[in-house]
Structures are given as structure tokens and as C-alpha cells.
Amino acid sequence: MPAVPVALARPGSRRLVRLITAFAAVLTFAALLLVAGPASAHDQLLSSDPKDGAKLDEQPTSIGLTFSAAPLDTGIEVALVGPDGTTAKGYDIQVDDKVVTAQLPEDLPAGKYDVAWHVVSSDGHPIDGEFTYVVEGEPEPTEEPTTGASDEPEMSTQEAAPVEEPADEASTPTELAGAGDGSSPSGLAVAGGILAAVLVVLGVVVMMRRKILENDRLRQANERGSEDPDAGERPNENPDTKG
């Protein structure tokens, strides 16, 4: 009985499939690193002057911001919203290494201020944030009641003008252009491109595996067709042989 050939995958084809699969895994891992990397690569605000929540006796003349790395000297904005909707913007903004300084107007009233800042970090991504401070100032003097010159005492007294208290909640600062979150459009575009590349590689792997299996089936069919199962079992029939 003739032996039945068994189709086996070629060693070279198996190595190629393993190589492409490993390449796809490495590409997927690189995509995850690129997506998670930008979120942790941005510069951070280390401190501010005034500090967040500080209570001051008088209005500061400037706002100071200290970052973990030197920001780019472009696109820097500092905006304030104070009591009764008072708004102001920092001017004459200077960048000295990691410190950004913005000058403030001199006629700002006492009260609570919300400060919104916007800079471009050293890696080119915009970042922003907010903090608050309170200028308590000096209370207004009260007026002393006056006495009349007549003999009859005056029954009415003058009440001191009430001191205006700062509003509990200031309005939200105007939204600055170019909010800088961990997922910028450039990061999403890179992640999308890498994901598309991974899908293409996986598609190529599937197509090549199907092609390899199809080639093995064709090779097996050809081997079966070319093999003669009765070869070697026929007797030697020679008409010239004499008994």
C-alpha cells in the first residue's frame, strides 16, 4: 500500500509569519507609548507669585509663573477677572529661563481675583491653568456723627457707609485660545496613523497565511497526482525469457 504524503508547512513560511507577527506586536507597543507619552511630556507650573489662595494687603504689580522647563516666548497670555466683573490682562510679558513675568495695571480694586494663564511648553504643546488670590486692602474710615449748634439735640445720626465686601465667587476668566490637554490634535493624528499601520500589517499577515496554506494544498495535490501507486509491484514480463 503506497504511503500517503502529508502536507507540512514550509519552515521558511513559518519563520516569515512569526517575523511579521512580532513586527506587528512591536508596532502596537510603540503606538501605545506614543499615545501615552505626550500626556506626561508637557511642562508643568511649579509655583506662582502670588501663590494660589494668597491673601494680600495690596495689589501686586506683576504676576510671576515658574515652570518645570523654559516655555517658548510666544503665545503667552495672562488674564484676570476681579470683583464686580473687573477684567485686566498682563502686559510687558517677559520670559527669563523658566520664569514668566507679566506686569499688571495699577488701578485694580481690592477683592478676589481669578488668574488664567496660557503658555506654549518647551515641547511645542500649549498648556494653561488658573489660580486665585485676594487683595484685602484697607477698610474705609467711618464718618463721625455731627452735633447741631442749636439747643435741641438732633435725633438723627449719620450712619457710616457700609464697606463693600468682595464677591464670594468671581466670574470665570475668559477662555484663552489653544487649550493644551494631554491629547492634542497632533498626538491623535500620530496615534491614528500608527493604528492604521498596525491594521495593515495584520491584514498582510492574514493574507500571507492564507496564501501559504493554499500553496501547500496545491503542492499536496500535485504530489498525489504525480505519484503512481502501482509502481514497483508489477512482475518482470519479458517475452524473450525462456523457461
Image (cartoon, grey):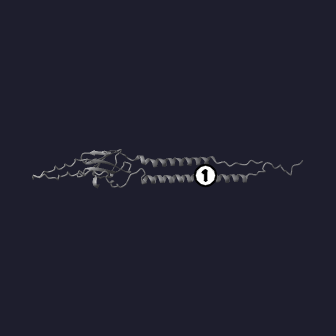
Which percent across, then down, holds residue 206? 59, 52
Please state which of residues 199 and 8 is positioned toward the viewer in this rendering.
Answer: 199
The residue lying at 51 percent from left, 53 percent from top is 197
Please state which of residues 59 and 11 is positioned toward the viewer in this rendering.
Answer: 59
Q: Which residue is mark 1?
A: 209
Under mark 1, the amino acid is Arg
| SS type, badge 1 | helix
The residue lying at 67 percent from left, 53 percent from top is 217
Q: How many marks on residues? A: 1
Q: Is residue 49 visible in this depiction of the protein?
A: no
The residue lying at 28 percent from left, 45 percent from top is 55
Q: Is residue 18 visible in this depiction of the protein?
A: yes
Please state which of residues 239 and 84 is positioned toward the viewer in this rendering.
Answer: 84
Q: Residue furthest right?
A: 243
Asked if residue 141 lies left or right of residue 77, the reply is: left
Which percent across, then down, holds residue 140? 20, 49
The residue lying at 64 percent from left, 52 percent from top is 213
Asked if residue 179 lies left or right of residue 150, the reply is: right
Which percent across, then down, holds residue 91? 27, 52
Q: Residue furthest front?
A: 152
Please state which of residues 172 and 29 is positioned toward the viewer in this rendering.
Answer: 172
Which percent across, then down, holds residue 126? 37, 51
Specify few, some or many for label 1: CA neighbours under 10 Å numbering under 14, 14-19, or 20 or more. Answer: some
